[in-house]
Image: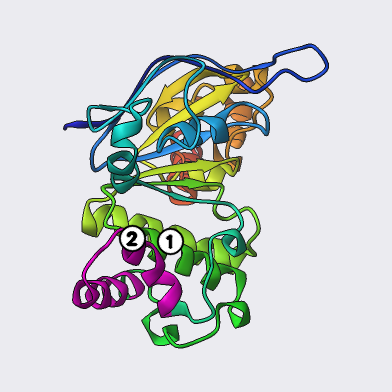
Amino acid sequence: METIIKTEDLHFSYPAVEGTTPVVLDGVDLEIQEGSFVAVLGHNGCGKSTLAKHMNAILLPSGGTVWVDGINTADEDRLLDVRRTVGMVFQNPDNQIVANVVEEDVAFAPENLGVPPAEIRQRVDDALKAVNMYQFREHAPHLLSGGQKQRVAIAGVIAMRPRCIVLDEPTAMLDPIGRKDVLRTIKTLNRERGVTVVLITHHMDEAAQAGRLIVMSKGRVVADGTPKEVFSQVEELHQVGLTVPHTTQLLWELRQEGFDVPLDALSDEECAQALYNLLQARGA
């Protein structure tokens, strides 16, 4: 697959505070393949949101380089091309919703890009249908639930027709139902429309749904692989202060007691099957 985002020896520090310049990103080397679904997991302060903001040039490197579809994000003349390629969805949808009617809000970005009116109408309808919010197109955004607002914010990005969407903790302010709806929308965009998705999260269950999982700690990548591969590294994740899904934790504790169970049985169903196989093997 083609690489859509690449970082080379990426370093970043925010302006000095009280005489110190804390390093937020410390030599990050990554390649994100087009059409993939990647989750970036880590504690608050690990650098994952700062990394996200480099992916569409909201922030520029203090050192190293970020490439988006072969474009250096530091090239001011290509900034619009970068942001057409990579759209951003933030934690609080209220910070992205700018209009008093849902369909007008979704039309805002395409209008600013100079898209012809007839095409804007088509893009708005298409984007709202993609996030299952078309029936709310004439509603006032402030009357929607948190999950519905976030889906409208995602629709606003989809209407720009980006090839990649980076979502910076988009479910952090949502209840369980809203989280589920937003995650379903994200996965549908990836599977059915081929949109590259980079999901920034601190929720284990969300990270487990991606095709690839990157774990960050103190500005560095400390693990990178499929969710099954990464979550099987229980001791290593514990060392950087991260837990693992309950299924993996249970199986790891059983292994500590000498039971022969796999650590990559990540889903509830796989874990239940592993426990059933264990009981069968022991003649229970």
In this figure, which residue is indicated by the disc labeled 2? 158
Q: In this rendering, is residue 141 above or below 35?
A: below
- Way the structure is coloured: rainbow
Q: Residue at x 69, y 24 (%)?
A: 241
Q: At which x and y percent is residue 230?
A: 46, 26
Residue 262 seen anywhere in this rendered image of the structure = no
The image quadrant of residue 65 is top left
The image quadrant of residue 132 is bottom left
Q: In this rendering, is residue 145 above or below 161?
A: below
Q: Residue at x 58, y 17 (%)?
A: 236
Q: Report the front residue among 132 and 206.
A: 132
Q: At which x and y percent is residue 187?
A: 36, 55
Classify the position of the N terminus by image quarter.
top left
**Which mark, by number, is residue 65?**
none
Taken as a whole, is the magenta stretch helix, strand or loop? Answer: helix
Q: At which x and y percent is residue 233?
A: 51, 21
Q: Residue at x 57, y 62 (%)?
A: 93
Q: What amino acid does circle 2 point to? A: Ile
Q: Which residues are magenta?
A: 103-128
Report crowding for label 2: few under 14, some 14 to 19, many 20 or more residues within 10 A (C-alpha).
Answer: many
The image quadrant of residue 22 is top right
Q: Report the front residue among 211 and 87.
A: 87
In this figure, which residue is indicated by the disc labeled 1? 154
Q: Report the front residue among 131 and 112.
A: 112
Q: Residue at x 56, y 47 (%)?
A: 169
- The residues bearing labels 2 and 1 have C-alpha atoms spaced at a distance of 6 Å
Q: Report the front residue among 98 and 207.
A: 98
Q: Find out whether the residues at labels 2 and 1 contact each other: C-beta distance under 8 Å.
A: yes
Label 2 SS: helix
